[in-house]
Amino acid sequence: MSGAIEQPRFTCALGSCQSVVAIKKGVPILHSGPGCGVQVERIIGQGEGYAGGSTMPCTNSEEADVVFGGEKKLRNVIENSFKVIDGDLYVVITGCTAAITGDDVASVVGEFQLDDKPIVYVEEGGFKSNNYVSHSRLVNAIIDQYVDKFNEDREVIEGLVNVFANIPYQDPYWNGNLEQLKRILTGIGLKVNILFGNESEGVSEWKSIPQAQFNLFVGSWAGLDIVKHLKRKYGTPYLHFPYTPIGAKETSKFLREVAKFGGLDEKKVEAYIDREEKKFYSHIDKMASFMLEFRYGIPRRFYSLADASYSLGFSKFLLNELGIIPGIQFIVDDIPEKYQESVLDEFSRISDLQRRDVQVVFDPDAGLDQKKLLEDAKDYENKRILILGSSWDKHIADELHGDLLIVSVPVQHRLVMNCGYLGYEGGLRAIEDIYDRVLATYR
Amino acid sequence: MSTISIKEPSVVIREKRLGTINAFTGSASQIVEKSAKGELHDCKRKFSQCLGCNQQQAFCQLAMIRDAVVINHAPIGCSGEFADFNFTYRIEQTKRNLPAALGRYYSTNILEKDTVFGAAKKLEETIRLAYEREHPNAIFVTTSCASGIIGEDIEAVVEAASKELGIPVATCNCEGFRSKIWTTGFDAAYHTVLRGIVKPAEKKTNKVNIINFWGSHVFDDIVRRFGYEPQYIIPFSTVEELSHVSEAAASIHICPSLSTYMGAGLNQLHGVPEVLVPPAYGVAGTDRWLRAFGKLVGKEEIAEEIIKEGHEKYLPEIEKLKERFKGKRAYVTAGAAHGQALITLLGELGMEVVGAAVFHHDPVYDSGDDKLDILGQAVKNYGDVPDYRVCNKQACELVNALNRIKPDLILARHGGMTLWGAKFGIPSLLIGDEQFGIGYKGALNYARRIDDALDSIEFIKNYSKHASNPYTKWWFEQDPGYFQGDGSGRGCARGNGGI
């Protein structure tokens, strides 16, 4: 889609600076206009992190830089970033001003790379893409310009896997989700490079990326370019699991696919899955009577305004584990056309028992999506509705007397720390959060 | 005095109009003196961190005009703030007993191909689409770095749209790179409103314009006491209300950094007089302000009544709290005029203001009247601030200064800066409501909140033990103004030099 957007739910290419913030002691350096960092932080940021927000170095382009070029200024800011900010990896990202004026960022950063400084650049420009796309470009730039320096034909480490999943900060629950991913993958016997967030060892972990036995991409499309790139570059095979697995059914399926792909010991893997499922369903057992018997109404139908990974993941989860039926799924991540068919295909197989026609709308103009949602909801006035969306959707949830679970940026109506909805524990957390919202509405 | 002209679509940027600077190292008395003598010159920095830009300040003023739509003619990233302002907008609706409404904001979503083949058509389409969806009474188009560099004739697009739709459609030229002073964005928004919305006065009313953000309505009682009606403009105004602000009896500034252009514009173009003394912060400041307002409206005796009542009602408790603040050293970080107002308040409360990191400095305001010099008055009333720096919101300068000065309290007025006090284990306070500190009651409000902040140190001390710090040892060994100016390492003391 390329038209106007009301209620944006992602940011521009420069948003990948938050992926740098998500790497331990990663320092983004923006070669951009003065307001860009703030704009990114305001829609996807969660506090400053280590060196994001007001700490993030930036050239703050002014009129003279646009007219005469900003290379000298960039050189100064890079040189002094090394002196002022204690980082393990510095990543220069260019904004609209530098992209249009055509600063030679490669040669400026190249001077520092020749000095063996841990620095990488990505030529973006906010208009070039959005942060769903630029995240892959950023990761690939780090691999090509930094990680690759340490790849001296070292051997593949059996059982080592690089994990790429939802985009840090764009997925509000990125950190919690990655923690869960690492937990379950370690559980089935893998050694995991999780690369971003608390459970990562930071830059040292990145250095072993070329040695992985295989790569894993968990998500619908945004990130696929990373594992494809790694396959071309190092010949590492990859497995693509095309949505966020939530709850026991999907997580077990996910783990079995990974185990098969990685050639893991089936007995051990099944033992782990069995343990986790028993725990999970013991809780479902406890709450099943509530779900079946509660007389004052709990949601029976849901809409999503979310990215494809969450929309698919939650649809499978809510349908199979909680009996909540999917209404229209509005996919707002500006998913390129070439990936839309596979998402529709996945939706067509959402039930094992019957064919379900889930209506899917791909449109990042969420203002228009909301109008369609309100129109459709008229037919279900007797049903309590759950909306999976963002803070933009608070008002329609209020209007429909529905329940809102925020699964997308912007997030103003809740505080996120280590919450994650991925995996077995994430599924339980989702159940708690959904019915917490429902029950809190009763006096 | 600058001459306000609305002939051109773009506002003249603040550094050209007012000689505004964003780097200085010295004392408050020095900057006051140099401002008066016209001796300040801006200088650059060899290292910089993320700022804010014009467009954000412009949007902040235009986004809550209740029946207007704002279209950001930009790539999608420039609309990161939409949701934030929508959140504020909706909370403030509740406070004002207004029905729930969503902020009506659109991005034209400029893509790479638009930078090559042009984005004007996209703007036309977005204006039509927004009109169909919302039927607003006005549409504002804010520009961006990308649209500015492409350099299309946006003015022609909006003029045609205005004719077609029969409502004002007005551009607000606020490209991020246009001005180094982000508050130029306020001026840009006001320029747009003065140019595109405000009509010549048909009559004079007893309304008083209070040019503000979305703070509490502290002027209600005061203004009514004088027999006038308060009219808080521009957030929460309607297009119709704005078209008549020229009819008001006077304009009040709550923060001249914000409203210098609007105040002077209404004065010069429509003859609406401004209250030209510093906003009513602190007891002495409130006395002075009330007298100035009384004089302006010819009711000086009412001012004296309010002063007497205010002193009787609030001073005893303020005096009591002042006892507790004796010997406490305070630090301020904030935008220019509001920072200076906070210095005034702290002085009033008997604290020693040992330092301030203020984001920019306007040597003079658009009215040209030096009676509006808040800092000059603060220095006169409460003494000098020995470490007064203009830091352009550079967190590294603030962090470095705090590490040296180690004050007992930090008063901040901007997200991302308060954090640093806490990281050093220093009680820190950010009060979002700009009007919270105004008047005698405001001084007491602040005194109470400061008392609370100084009291609740357990969290701050515990957090500071575990807080992350990305700055190097080397940086803490340099002077805070190291990167300002001529590379001497000691900062832009004379306010000149540059690289």
Image: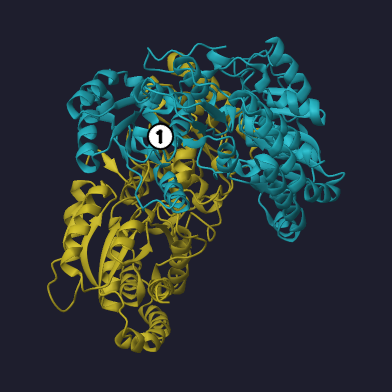
Chain colours: A yellow, B cyan
Tell me the quarter of the picture where residue B217 sits: top right
Up the image or down, A3 lies above or below A103; here it is below
Up the image or down, B130 lies above or below A208; here it is above
Q: Position of residue A88 (x, y in %)?
A: 59, 44
Residue, disc 1 = B62
Q: Position of residue A168 (x, y in %)?
A: 44, 52
Secondary element under disc 1, as helix, strand or loop, is helix
**Neighbour class for label 1 at 10 Å: few (<14), some, many (≥20)?**
many
Up the image or down, B347 lies above or below B313; here it is above
Residue B73 visible somewhere in the drawing:
no
Placement of the N terminus of chain B among the 4 image quadrants: top right
B247 or A48: nearer the viewer: B247
Q: Position of residue B266 (x, y in %)?
A: 47, 21
Specify the amino acid type for callout 1: Leu
A66 or B126: nearer the viewer: B126
Placement of the C terminus of chain B among the 4 image quadrants: top right
Q: Chain of mark 1?
A: B
